[in-house]
Amino acid sequence: MRYQKLRGTEDIISPQIEVWQEIENISRGVFEVSGYKEIKTPIIEFLQLFQRSIGENTDIVEKEIFKFQDRSERKIALRPEATASIVRAYLECGLYQNPGLTKLYYLGPMFRAERPQKGRKRQFYQVGIEAIGSLNPEIDAEVIYLVKKLLDNLGVDDFRIEINSLGCDNDKIKISNYLKDKISENLDQFCQNCQNRFERNVLRILDCKNPDCKSCLKNLQIDIKSIICSDCMQHYKEVKLLLTVLGVKYKENEYLVRGLDYYTRTVFEVLNSDLGAQNVICAGGRYDNLVEEMGGKSTGAVGFALGMERIVMLLENKSRKNIELDVFLVLQDRMFLKEALKELMNLRENGIYADMDYQGRSLKSQMRLANEKKARYVLILGQKEWEQGEFCLKDMKTGSQINIKKEKLLEFVS
Ligand code: ATP
Ligand code: MG
């Protein structure tokens, strides 16, 4: 019986895995130097955690959560995103007791029951950060700066940062009422999706991708900025000023809203023009009410999540350097096995990438395998050399072959 993977899931193998590892390593570097500590939260959580935080009337909660009942009939979900889990952990682990801000980063799989397509999977991976503990605009600016820094360091050269402010909770209610007023008489001109959203989550009509809906909004002369309170406007202004100070280019998009209910004030997305329909590579914003809603003190917070599959798609075509195999050990006779194994481990211990044949091949096949594996050197353990305390070393680039004293080997191949 042969099995196949589930739709919307992937086996990630070499050489692609090297791109993934590079993204992980570069992300860790950028975040750690900025004071962010890694957090690993469980992949399963109580369903309610996501229903409450992301919002009942959102695509994620309505359609996309993988959920099941455990043996005690508790409702469990595979996490569709990390922010809710991280806020839960922030409270449950008492991270608010640490001095200063709580700065966290994560890397890991998320799950959403979506229609699988390029850049849209059912198990997909995100890397992201959360900075919990401040309402100040400087942390919004830092978080957005770090997105840019990360993409720069990864070598993603074509991206655009769009930002907007949704205002505080009060403003969001006012915006929703304003939109309902404005749109209700013309609702039939909007797409079916928007008509469904009208009652349940009218804000989402703002970022409908349908061109007809877009032009309807334009014709209705929707102006959100006039509704947002002066404190929130001031905050937004300062975020923009600080982004400019940090040299982060951005574009304001007053129709940008996110698909999760917890966002307030600053929201942003990073887009790439090469990716077609799945063109948002990263998204984030503030969620100043979430900690309190989950039972903590009122606490400002901001973060982002970056979709790793979409970054891999952008980086795949760039040439990456593969780790090279330094030495391949070849045994003239199986009687050298013990010595070969010891030498193999010794080389590795000294940071040399060394390997050998484990399948009892003939001398000729071992040489062929070394060639196929693109080894830089082949180390031959043979009777004649052995008697003189030497190895025979073949340089696979030049084809030249020398005898080398065992003590000198490390120095030579390093
Ligand atoms: P989209 O509009 O593409 O559905 P989203 O608004 O649902 O994205 P978020 O929940 O904000 O996305 O997640 C942040 C990032 O995670 C997205 O910008 C995207 O890069 C990535 N992402 C989201 N869903 C998927 C998925 N199903 N497969 C792969 N990547 C995804
Ligand atoms: Mg989505």
Image: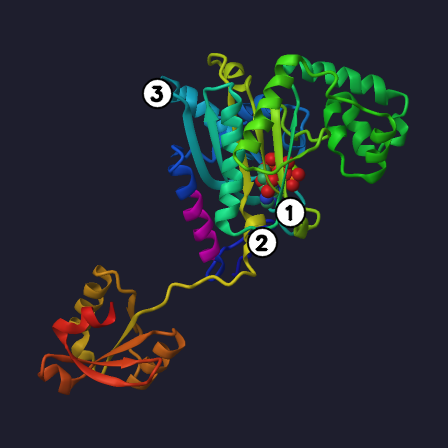
Q: Nearer the viewer, residue 204 or 72?
A: 204
Q: Confirm or deny contact between disc 1 and disc 2 (CB under 8 A).
A: yes
Q: Is residue 314 above or below residue 75?
A: below
Q: Is residue 325 left or right of residue 52?
A: left
Residue occupying image coordinates x 79% and y 24%: 198
Q: Is residue 33 above or below residue 157?
A: above
Local secondary structure at mark 3:
loop
Find residue 247 and report its image quarter.
top right
Residue occupying image coordinates x 62% and y 13%: 231
Amino acid type shown at disc 2:
Leu
Q: Which mark is residue 171?
A: none
* Residue hosting label 3: 98
Q: Which mark is residue 314?
A: 2
* Residue hosting label 1: 272
- Whichever of labels 1 and 3 marks the residue nearer the N terminus, that label is 3
Local secondary structure at mark 1:
loop
Q: Quadrant of the C terminus?
A: bottom left
Disc 1 to disc 3, C-alpha distance: 37 Å
- Does the residue tagged 1 have its C-beta within 8 Å of any atom of ligand 1? no
Task: Verify whether residue 81 appears in magenta.
Answer: no
